[in-house]
Image (tube, rainbow, N blue to C red):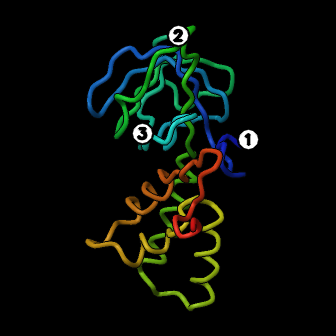
Amino acid sequence: MTTAHPDRDMPGVALQIHEVRSVDESEATVVVRCIAGPVNLGARFHQLRDTTVSINLELTRILCYDRPVPALTPVHSALVTLRGRGTRELRSASRATGHQMIYGISKNAYEQLKSIVQKLIDAELPEDQEDRLIEELKVRVLHPRVTDLIYHSTPPLTAGEVVDQALSYRPIELTPGQTSDASCSS
């Protein structure tokens, strides 16, 4: 597997957007090129390159030469349908802006994360096994307080909601001269 996520060493998927054909609040039909993959149906995308915009898009259809296919492999292009939050953020390529990239994880990796979170929500494991699962989760997502999403959300989140929020998290980028903690200034 290739590493596609720019913020962590995690197997992932990436699509380069060439043309947005149609878009509404929850669905977009887009011509893409696979940059890292393979990208299978059900893949989840949570980041647009060079932005802090939060998206949560699921790949629901891939058409190659007007025929449905289950996956898109690197360097190949296709017409795809993406559903979820953030469809209006997708842009066609232009000389001025270049190509947009979206990053995500495979359906299998997403399901594995959901399984880990569900085991933690169920709280039926011995403490040492829960600790190992928490450490694994912290390695696989950037969210600094992922356990707060599991144990301290009101109302409680489902495993899928926890994973989506954890994957959508983006650290704040500081400009030169900024500090990450206001208490550091005198």
Mark 3 or 2: in front is: 2
Measure how far apart labels 3 and 2 are at the Cα level: 22 Å
* SS assignment at label 2: loop
Measure how far apart labels 1 and 2 are at the Cα level: 27 Å
Q: Where 67 falls versus 157 (above or below)?
A: above
Q: Are marks 1 and 2 in contact (CB under 8 Å)?
A: no
| Relative image position of residue 47 (x, y in whole percent) | 51, 41
Visible residue check, residue 108? yes
Say what amino acid the circle numbered 1 marks: Thr
Q: Which mark is residue 138?
A: none
Which image quarter is the N terminus in?
top right
Say what amino acid the circle numbered 2 marks: Ser
Residue pushed farthest front? 186
Say what amino acid the circle numbered 3 marks: Leu
Q: Residues within 10 Å of mark 2 (few under 14, many from 20)?
A: few
In the picture of the structure, the residue carrying the numbered disc 1 is 2
| Relative image position of residue 90 (x, y in whole percent) | 43, 26
Residue pushed farthest top? 95
Q: Are marks 3 and 2 in contact (CB under 8 Å)?
A: no
Q: Which mark is residue 57?
A: 3
Residue ID at (50%, 68%) = 146
In the picture of the structure, the residue carrying the numbered disc 2 is 94
Visible residue check, residue 43? no
| Relative image position of residue 86 (x, y in whole percent) | 37, 36
Q: Is residue 157 left or right of residue 138?
A: left
Q: Mark 2 or mark 1, which is nearer the start of the sequence?
A: 1
| Residue 81 lies in quadrant | top left
